[in-house]
Image: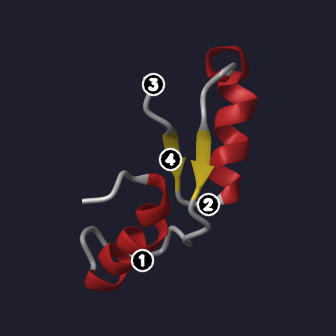
């Protein structure tokens, strides 16, 4: 099973698709729609990531 590629913003997804179109063929690409303006490990970002990724991860 291939792991999906996860990006935070639509512009990140678009950049990957432009630059790596052939390599992404058949890959699942998930956009979380989270603005890339948080600091590393900022608590609000961590909570957003947990919430948005929950549906893409197997149950704990």
Decide: is 46 above or below 1: below
2 over 40 or under it: above or below: above
Upstream in the sequence, badge 1 or badge 2? 2
Rendering quarter of residue 51: bottom left
Which quadrant of the view contains residue 54? bottom left
Residue drawn 61% across the image and 40% down it: 29
Single out the residue that lies furthest toward the bottom.
44
Of the residues tagged 1 and 2, which is closer to the observer? 1
Q: Residue at x 26, y 83 (%)?
A: 43
Q: Which class describes the residues within 10 Å of circle 1: few (<14), some (14-19), or many (20+)? A: some
* Residue 40 location (% of width, % of height): 27, 68
Q: Residue furthest top?
A: 22
Instruction: Report, in whole angstroms, how far the alpha carbon at label 3 lies from the one at label 4.
Output: 12 Å
Q: Which mark is residue 9?
A: 2
* Disc 1 element: helix
Name the image quarter holding the N terminus: top left
Q: Earlier in the sequence, mark 1 or mark 4?
A: 4
Whether pointer 3 and pointer 2 mark residues with C-beta atoms closer than 8 Å, the reply is: no
- Of badges 1 and 3, the one in the foreground is 3
Give the label on residue 6, or none.
4
Instruction: Give the residue displayed 68% in from the left and 26% down from the top.
Output: 19
C-alpha gap between disc 1 and disc 2: 13 Å
Q: Residues within 10 Å of mark 4 (few under 14, many from 20)?
A: some
Give the side of residue 3 with respect to residue 24, left or right.
left
| Labels 2 & 4 near each other (Cβ < 8 A) | no
- Label of residue 48 in the image: 1
* Quadrant in the rendering for residue 32: bottom right
Give the mark, 3 or 2, whose residue is nearer the N terminus: 3
Q: CA distance from mark 3 to mark 2?
A: 21 Å
Residue 2: mark = 3
């Amino acid at each position: 099973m291939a792991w999906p590629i996860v990006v935070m913003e639509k512009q990140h997804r678009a950049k990957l698709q432009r630059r790596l179109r052939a390599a992404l063929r058949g890959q699942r690409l998930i956009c979380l729609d989270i603005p890339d303006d948080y600091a590393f490990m900022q608590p609000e970002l961590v909570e957003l990531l947990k919430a948005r990724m929950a549906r893409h991860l197997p149950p704990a």
